[in-house]
Image (cartoon, rainbow, N blue to C red):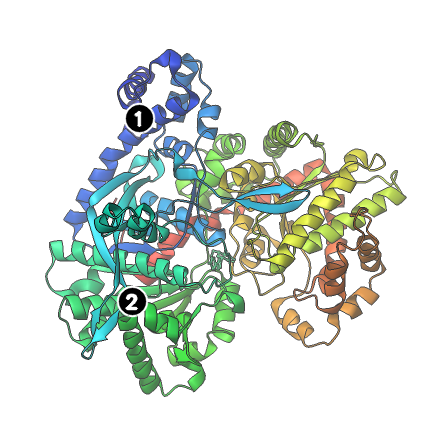
């Protein structure tokens, strides 16, 4: 294996004790859980330093191309367990802590979950970092060191309330502050003469580095997060005159930039501070990239051979104009050279086609905050229109708005979608015009997830079955999971897969009874929908089915029901009223169902608050049924869907995003498909009164809506859901009604299939066996080959 494995428990015990004593200043008998966690984290971190330095050396020696992944979000989650596992230190640390009477599980739980992202886009960035390290792809992640990550969700009387998240109120043991790596970021002001920018506001971007170690500790890349600091500490004159608040104003203003993550997932906030955050990250990253390039080379013509920049959605799309600006205004290149070089380095990933997510900024705001960039954008646009003779519709600037998707597309060598269906829809719909103008630009890279965190770390029980069955090494060669197929008829293997699942379900039940005070029946189908709350993801469809099931059980409790546990998890954007209504309805339904003695163990509904990466690691291994039920054409890819498949859950889903490819990989007969296709959805929207028609055709759905509107789930406030029910009848923007009967029918098939335990285990085996394609290693290899033109350095 690797060098780390040779570290004896005794040697590690000494290292941990030393950190406890000399770094934390604590005597063992007085050490708190926090002290232990810090001492263990520092000791594990020490062991990453060597591979980290070695990777940096090899990268310099290779003189090759580096990848720079620019993202406003990195949804990292907890780090310690992942680092221990990748270094092969899990058992050793466990032994040491056991000897000290400390629980490793408690130590791991003590770490705050770094939530510097909203959902799939941010988590994808984190999986990509881990895969790039595993594959020894020389790469840097660039992001913002938000002081406050995604808000903490609480439920008060079933309603979501948001509390600030505070992961940095304790020292962060995985970061290295780099005071010397500092850049000035400028805003506002005016242009002197033709185009000399005289900004009126400046802040410093200071680097904070985190090593990201890959599988078996063979390589580590850097995640560099930028924190905003004032260029002037405080106003001494104001301070001396007694106005202490005004004196501190510059500091407060600067720090605002990296204060908090915007909590919108797939919607455009449109706020000035957000634009400033986007520019802050982009400018700091590009200045750093150029500084590093110039330390090794002197001819900018070589930049595209040495630098590949990936824009994670349009959030860092100012990279085009900013790179041109730096090359021209700071380094003296002419327009044509600067633009050609920028285009040669940049690539753009699109993550959604939902219109509300497509970023635009008014030319007024852009011109005020970034006057030089507005000028550059106008010129890029002029040349784009002249060169392509395109329709006005395809311009970057139209109706006084800057269209960031168009800007990113025009300034990128490659533009990619995140699943086969999504990429096809890009070409056919939102980007069809641009695709016509630049036909070689769009390509697909189907998303993936890292099997280290999402299988090996989160599901040790199943991991052991896999290693016992197909042998070691699948963690870094996930396609090998297909070898499981040859064991399909081996009863012992099917039983072992079933036993691992049951083990995880029991662990989840214990957690639920501790945390939520609810007992879950381990013989039930654990049916899980965890993701951001959004109408297009159709949690509402799932609640409607839950209500129907409850009512059907009540009218015939002896009908031989397959028991169900419905688990929901997810946050709504604070200003998203419709999503918050659905949260409240789920909690109201849970309240009624869980206290109904007639239903008992046959149906439970649980919605633990504050779903995050750590909760996902707990829920996914214990899931039987994965809900991937978005309106076809709306979910660009999904990545939770892949994690479930890897962990032996079966999917109930529509032909949307990567579900299409999951179904292909695992086999159609091992997937519970329902609902309209993307093309059928498009036609359905054209039918006036589509929802009303569907509801009138479905007595079951009529009953469900009737129960809600009668106040069966809100007896103290019978009007609570009038708006929701009315909207379902009259608007139903995501076709819940039109897919309801199909969903119901397939849910009945799930019940039947689950009743035959051995058959179900066989289906689970086929799902695991077909999941190898969804490793983010495969995805990153695709980016390396088709977009970045880089090679592994191992
Ligand atoms: O990106 C994921 C996909 O798997 C999901 O299907 C997709 O919904 C998600 C603005 C977004 N698309 N767009 C965003 C996030 C934050 C924000 O401010 C948009 N997230 C996705 C990974 O490809």
Q: Give 304 or 336, whichever is nearer the viewer.
A: 336
Give whichever of discs 1 and 2 has the lower sequence position.
Answer: 1
- Mark 1 and mark 2 residues within 8 Å of each other at the beta carbon: no
| Callout 1: SS | helix
Q: Is residue 497 above or below residue 11?
A: below
Q: Is residue 353 visible?
A: yes
Identify which residue is drawn at 47% across, 42% down: 165
Percent from the top left, x then y, of residue 77?
Answer: 44, 40
Between 630 and 286, which is closer to the camera in this rendering? 286
Numbered tag placed on residue 188 in the rendering = 2
Q: Which residue is mark 1?
A: 43
Which class describes the residues within 10 Å of circle 1: few (<14), some (14-19), or many (20+)? many
Point out residue 440 in the picture as x, y percentages from the top left corner: 37, 74
The image shows a total of numbered marks equal to 2
Q: Nearer the viewer, mark 1 or mark 2?
A: 2
Residue 654 visible in the shown view: no
Quarter of the image where the N terminus is located: top left
């Amino acid at each position: 294996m690797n060098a780390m494995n040779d570290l004896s428990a005794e040697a590690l015990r000494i290292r941990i004790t030393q950190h406890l004593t000399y770094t934390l200043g604590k005597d063992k008998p007085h050490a708190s859980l926090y002290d232990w966690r810090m001492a263990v984290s520092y000791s594990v971190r020490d062991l990453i330093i060597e591979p980290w330095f070695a990777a940096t050396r090899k990268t310099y020696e290779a003189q090759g191309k580096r990848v720079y992944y620019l993202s406003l979000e990195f949804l990292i989650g907890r780090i310690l367990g992942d680092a221990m596992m990748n270094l092969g230190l899990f058992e050793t640390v466990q032994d040491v802590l056991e000897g000290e009477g400390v629980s490793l599980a408690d130590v791991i739980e003590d770490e705050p979950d770094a939530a510097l992202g909203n959902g799939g886009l941010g988590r994808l960035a984190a999986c990509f970092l881990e895969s790039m390290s595993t594959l020894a792809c020389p790469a840097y992640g660039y992001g913002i060191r938000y002081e406050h990550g995604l808000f903490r969700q609480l439920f008060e009387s079933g309603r979501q309330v948001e509390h600030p998240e505070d992961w940095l109120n304790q020292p962060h043991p995985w970061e290295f502050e780099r005071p010397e790596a500092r850049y000035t970021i400028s805003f506002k002001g005016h242009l002197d003469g033709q185009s000399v920018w005289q900004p009126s506001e400046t802040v410093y971007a200071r680097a904070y580095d985190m090593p990201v170690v890959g599988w078996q500790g063979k390589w580590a890349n850097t995640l560099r997060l930028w924190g905003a600091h004032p260029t002037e500490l405080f106003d001494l004159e104001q301070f001396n005159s007694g106005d202490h608040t005004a004196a501190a104003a510059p500091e407060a203003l600067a720090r605002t930039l990296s204060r908090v993550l915007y909590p919108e997932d797939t919607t455009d906030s449109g706020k000035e501070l957000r634009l400033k955050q986007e520019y802050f990250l982009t400018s700091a990253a590009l200045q750093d990239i150029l500084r590093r390039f110039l330390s090794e080379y002197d001819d900018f013509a070589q930049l595209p051979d040495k630098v590949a920049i990936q824009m994670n959605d349009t959030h860092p799309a100012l990279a085009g104009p900013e790179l041109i600006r730096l090359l021209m205004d700071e380094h003296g290149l002419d327009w044509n050279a600067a633009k050609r070089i920028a285009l040669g380095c940049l690539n753009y990933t699109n993550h959604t086609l939902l219109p509300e997510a497509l970023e635009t900024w008014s030319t007024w705001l852009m011109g005020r905050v970034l006057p030089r960039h507005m000028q550059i954008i106008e010129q890029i646009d002029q040349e784009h229109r002249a060169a392509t003779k395109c329709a006005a519709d395809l311009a970057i600037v139209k109706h006084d708005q800057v269209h960031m998707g168009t800007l990113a597309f025009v300034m990128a060598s490659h533009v990619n979608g995140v699943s086969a269906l999504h990429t096809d829809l890009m070409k056919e719909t939102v980007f069809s015009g641009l695709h016509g103008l630049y036909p070689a630009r769009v390509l697909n890279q189907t998303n993936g997830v890292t099997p280290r965190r999402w299988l090996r770390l989160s599901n040790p029980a199943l991991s052991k079955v896999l290693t016992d069955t197909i042998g070691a090494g699948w963690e870094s060669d996930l396609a090998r999971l297909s070898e499981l197929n040859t064991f399909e008829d081996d009863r012992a293997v099917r039983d072992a897969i079933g036993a691992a699942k049951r083990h995880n379900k029991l662990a989840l039940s214990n957690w639920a009874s501790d945390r939520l005070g609810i007992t879950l029946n381990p013989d039930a189908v654990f049916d899980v929908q965890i993701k951001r709350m959004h109408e297009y993801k159709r949690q509402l469809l799932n609640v409607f089915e839950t209500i129907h099931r409850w009512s059907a059980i009540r009218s015939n409790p002896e009908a031989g029901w397959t028991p169900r546990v419905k688990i929901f998890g997810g946050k709504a954007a604070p200003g998203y009223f419709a999503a918050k209504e659905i949260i409240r309805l789920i909690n109201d339904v849970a309240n009624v169902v869980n206290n109904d003695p007639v239903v008992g163990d046959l149906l439970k509904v649980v919605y633990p608050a504050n779903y995050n990466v750590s909760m996902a690691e707990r829920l996914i291994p214990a899931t039987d049924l994965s809900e991937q039920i978005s309106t076809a054409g709306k979910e660009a890819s999904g990545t939770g869907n892949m994690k479930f498949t890897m962990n032996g859950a079966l999917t109930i889903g529509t032909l949307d995003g990567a579900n299409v490819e999951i179904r292909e990989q695992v086999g159609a007969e091992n997937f519970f498909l329902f609902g309209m296709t993307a093309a059928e959805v498009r036609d359905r929207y054209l039918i006036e009164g589509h929802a009303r028609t569907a509801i009138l055709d479905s007595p079951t759905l009529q009953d469900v809506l009737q129960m809600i509107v009668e106040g069966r789930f809100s007896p103290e406030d019978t009007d609570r859901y009038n708006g929701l029910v009315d909207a379902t009848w009259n608007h139903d923007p995501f076709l819940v009604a039109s897919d309801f009967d199909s969903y119901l029918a397939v849910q009945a098939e799930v019940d039947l299939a689950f009743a035959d335990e051995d058959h179900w285990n066989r289906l689970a085996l086929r799902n695991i066996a077909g999941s190898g394609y969804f490793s983010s290693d495969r995805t990153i290899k695709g980016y390396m080959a088709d977009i970045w033109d880089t090679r592994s350095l191992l």
